[in-house]
Amino acid sequence: RAKEQGGGVYRFFSAEMREETLMRHTLQQDMRGAAARGEFILHYQPRVSLHSLEVVSAEALIRWRHPRLGNVPPDCFIGLAEENGCIAEIGAWVLTEAVRQVAAWRNGGRMLKISVNLSPRQLNDRGIVDTVREVLDREGLPPEALELEITESALMQDQNLAISVMRELKHLGVQLSIDDFGTGYSSLSHLRKFPLDCLKLDRSFLDEEQASDINPLILAESIIDLAHALKLSVVAEGVENAEHLDFLRRTSCDEVQGYVISRPLPAAEFEACFAGWRCIVAGACGMPAPT
Ligand code: C2E
Ligand code: MG
Ligand code: MG
Ligand code: MG
């Protein structure tokens, strides 16, 4: 019987799965030292305040230019980097590069903030506090200009460790946000345990295709109100069209991020687009374009 089962397992290990396993293995091998070889770059996506219509912040998003495979998206390698431990090296590179870039923008007069994604393993390692402190010191960035985005799954692993690391990060003065809120299982009341400043509402709330009796926009609106009651500011993610933008402006949502304003861009392109973005938001909200 065991043999039969074994055969079954073998049979179901299809060509496709074999290929996937090989690919995982390849990526995990190749990511070692990739940061030092200069294979990663950051793209920046603007965050616009619905109060001032200004670009107030940028989210740094990693891109891997693999020498043979071409562009590998973060969803395909961040998880693998968590598994083999490379996330420490990659995460430190992201933090350094993002902080260096925003410090340069601020020296040039653009008083932006920067958001960096932390993976679960990074948050569940006390070393992150020293890494963040050192990077801020080296680049001379005021800590309040750095926001660290944390997903619900990172908070669920070892809650006491997460809370204590987050308190230390807050003590440094950095901002903390919960990313992709609404995709996991935690409720807002549960999140009160963690020292958070900001809630990033997952883009699924703006997805009208989603099968549900309740209009997801109504849900979005009530989460925004609840978040405010808990003293969290709210950023809507994945805002793709003018209708959503207009809807969000009529709620009390604080900031928006999404393709309607801009895709994530390389630093040079990001800089070149500043003036245009304010006009896009104003236009989509039926307001006169700022001068
Ligand atoms: P995230 O942090 O939630 O980032 C937002 C993702 O949504 C980005 O995908 C962005 O390109 C995409 N996006 C932005 N606006 C829109 C929109 O209007 N519509 C749609 N459909 N998508 C939009 P990206 O860059 O592929 O990153 C995917 C995820 O990979 C990120 O989700 C984040 O969890 C992770 N990631 C990216 N960079 C890093 C990093 O440096 N470190 C870590 N640990 N994770 C990262
Ligand atoms: Mg994020
Ligand atoms: Mg997100
Ligand atoms: Mg996401």
Image (spheres, rainbow, N blue to C red):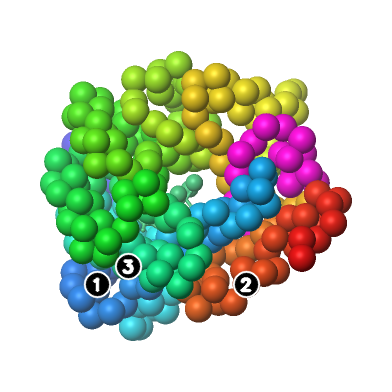
Circle 2 or circle 1, nearest the eye: 2
Q: Residues within 10 Å of mark 2 (few under 14, many from 20)?
A: few
Residue 119 in sight from this viewpoint: yes
Circle 1 or circle 3, nearest the eye: 3
- Residue extending furthest toward the top: 189
Residue at image location 54% in from the left, 25% down from the top = 227
**Type of residue at label 3?**
Arg
How far apart marks 1 and 3 lie (CA) works out to 16 Å
**Type of residue at label 2?**
Cys
Quadrant of the image occupied by residue 291: bottom right
Q: Residues within 10 Å of mark 1 (few under 14, many from 20)?
A: some
How far apart marks 3 and 2 lie (CA) works out to 20 Å
Q: State yes or no: Cβ of the residue under disc 3 lies below 8 Å from any atom of ligand 1.
A: no
- Residue extending furthest toward the bottom: 67
**Magenta stretch bounds:** 243-259
**Type of residue at label 1?**
Ala
Q: Is residue 64 left or right of residue 201?
A: left
Measuring from the top left, give residue 39's x and y in whole percent.
Answer: 31, 77
Question: What secondary structure is found at the residue carrying circle 3?
Answer: helix
Label drawn at residue 35:
1
Q: Is residue 13 left or right of residue 131?
A: right
Q: Is residue 171 left or right of residue 185?
A: left
Question: What secondary structure is found at the residue carrying circle 2?
Answer: loop
Residue at image location 50% in from the left, 78% down from the top = 268
Residue that badge 3 annotates: 100
Quadrant of the image occupied by residue 179: top left
Mark 1 or 3, nearer chain start: 1
Quadrant of the image occupied by residue 16: bottom left
Question: Does residue 118 sit above or below 198 in this rendering?
Answer: below
Residue that badge 2 annotates: 273
Report the front residue among 73 and 100.
Answer: 100
